[in-house]
Structure formats: structure tokens, C-alpha cells
Amino acid sequence: MFFITLFPILLFYQIPLLIHPSRFGSQTDLSHIYARSVLEGKSEAAQHKQVIVLGDSASSTAIHPEIATNTLNLSMWAASYLESEQVLTKYLENVGKPQCVIIMNSYIPSMYWGDWFPNYVAHNNWWSLSELFNMWVSHEESWFRGSLRFLKNLPERFRLESSYLKFFQYGIWNENRYSALSKIFDTKFGSFIVEAEKGTFGENFRPWHLLLEKPFSQDKNFDKSLNRILSRLEKEEVPSFLVNFPISNSLEVESIQKHIQQRNAHLKKIGTYYSKNKFININSFLPAEYFHDNLHLNPSGALLFTKNLSESGVCL
């Protein structure tokens, strides 16, 4: 079975990459300056200017990197609060306290198990993580991407890097940011795979979740992880904001809208944090022209959302 799965992926290794950062050149972007200063410990002031964003791939494309220049987006593809909690813990323990943290609310309560293959080949030096990232980008719409759902244990660094896929495709790319993100994992976080929750496996996790009558109250990690994130930030005296990212109003979204309403209602029951006016809900639905797809903003959408978010009082 291993070789059946391995052969088609090895075949794709021979196909030339269609997209590479060098094709786009350098973009005007200062966030890597803050990231590098924090990571190398050269500037205490830079640490206090750092804004951290936690969330999934929709979060990573919701904050425009050329507007929020003091922001380090640690959102990861398909991340849940359980994973965001572990990424935040790594950051606080190994990098330091940020100025504030923006937590983008996913409408998905649970999490993927990842994909074992990129993790295996990376740790055995078959391909570098950057090569795997480029392969993912090059064949985003191919059956190569579809095959990922059958695998597990996708390394968090690869998932974080792949979260920048949409900006990458539009040419908003900066090699220095890529290096800064890689350096976090190389020198600060080390190698780690987040804990996986029983009952969620690959793509099966989404329909499994949608079948639950009360998905947010039935997923205990949703409550526990979010509360631990917020209480940890409160203890560290780091301001935090819970933010809804928008979705396209062109979606057949009746079920998703119901899902979001369930989530928001549930969030208000699980702690005292809403009494502190930290819940930001702007532009929940935007026209399709602002999206790369139904859930990931394109640069125009990210520009609008980031400006509106900044004007709402969030620390950008």
C-alpha cells in the first residue's frame, strides 16, 4: 500500500514546477524586518511591536501583508484552536511576548490529522520543505492535492508555509518573510507535530463534523483550547481579539451561515471574554469579486478587510 501511494507522488517530482517565488520578485513589505528582529533578539522594541495572527488558511489570506506590516501571521492550513494553542505556546516560550494576538475564528470546530508523506520525506532528506511547498503550489488543482487527504501527519511548518498559497499565486511574495517563518521552526520551535484528536481523520473530518447536532459543544477541544488560549494571553497581559473572517456571499451558504450562528452563540457561553469587548465581527459576507475562492480572500479582499479591521480598533 505504501508503494502504491508513493509511486504517483514520486512521478510528480519529475514534473517542472510551474510557480516559483523568483518569478515574482521582491514586494514592498516590512513585516520581515520585525520578524527577523524578534527571532534574532536584536531589538526588544520590535518584540513589543509584533502582532501575531492565529487561525487557518482563510486567516492567512485575510490579513494583507503590505498593510499590516508589523504582523507575523502564524495561521496554518486547516488549523483548529487546538493547533493554534500549541503554536502560540511555542511562540510565547521560545520567541517572547507579542504586542497583541488576533485570533481568527474558524467555523470548523475540529481539526485534520495531517499528512504523513511530506513529513516523512522531509525528515529523510528526500525533498526539502520548500520543494514540497512548491510542489503543492504547482499542482494545487491536480489529483496530487486530492491525494493528500489519504495521508496523515502533515508537518506544521509545511502547513504554515502552504497557507500563504493564495498570496503567493497573486505575486505578493517576499523571500525574507519566507525565511523568517522558516527560521521560527528551524531555530525556535524545532520539530513538532501537534496532537491529533480521535474521531477526525483527513477529509473525513469535515463531514464527520457537519453531521454533529451540536458540533461546537460536542467538540470539547474547541472550548478547552480556546479558553486556554485566551486565559494564557490574559495571564501574560497580552491583548487579544477574536475576529470573524468573511466568506463569499455567492456561496450556497445556508448551512454555513447556520454553522457560524451556532459557533457565535456557543462562543458567548464559554467564558467571560465577550464581556471585555474583544469580539470583532465585520464584513461577515463579501461579494465574490473579493475572493480567490469562497473562503480565501484575494489581495483586494484582504486589503479591504485589513483596513476595516484596523479601523475597528484591532492592533494592526
Image (cartoon, grey):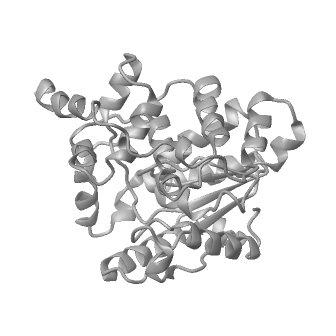
Q: Determine the image quadrant of residue 85.
A: top right
The residue lying toward the viewer, choosing from 178 and 23, is: 23
The residue lying toward the viewer, choosing from 101 and 115, is: 115
Quick check: 229 above or below 151?
below
Residue found at x 35% / y 75%? 256
Quick check: 62 above or below 29?
below
Residue found at x 68% / y 72%? 309
Q: Determine the image quadrant of residue 22.
A: top right
- Left/right of residue 285 with respect to residue 240 in the rendered view: left
Q: Is residue 201 visible?
A: no
The residue lying toward the viewer, choosing from 217 and 277, is: 277
The C terminus lies in quadrant: bottom right
- Left/right of residue 88 with respect to residue 79 in the rendered view: right
Quick check: 9 above or below 148?
above
Q: Is residue 203 visible?
A: yes
Q: How many marks?
A: 0
Residue 162 in the image, given as x and y percentages of width and height? 46, 45
Quick check: 191 above or below 182?
above
Residue found at x 62% / y 46%? 25
Residue 189 in the image, given as x and y percentages of width and height? 59, 28
Residue 14 in the image, given as x and y percentages of width and height? 27, 30
The residue lying toward the viewer, choosing from 149 and 79, is: 149
Residue 282 in the image, given as x and y percentages of width and height? 60, 79
- Left/right of residue 274 with respect to residue 247 in the rendered view: right
The N terminus lies in quadrant: top left
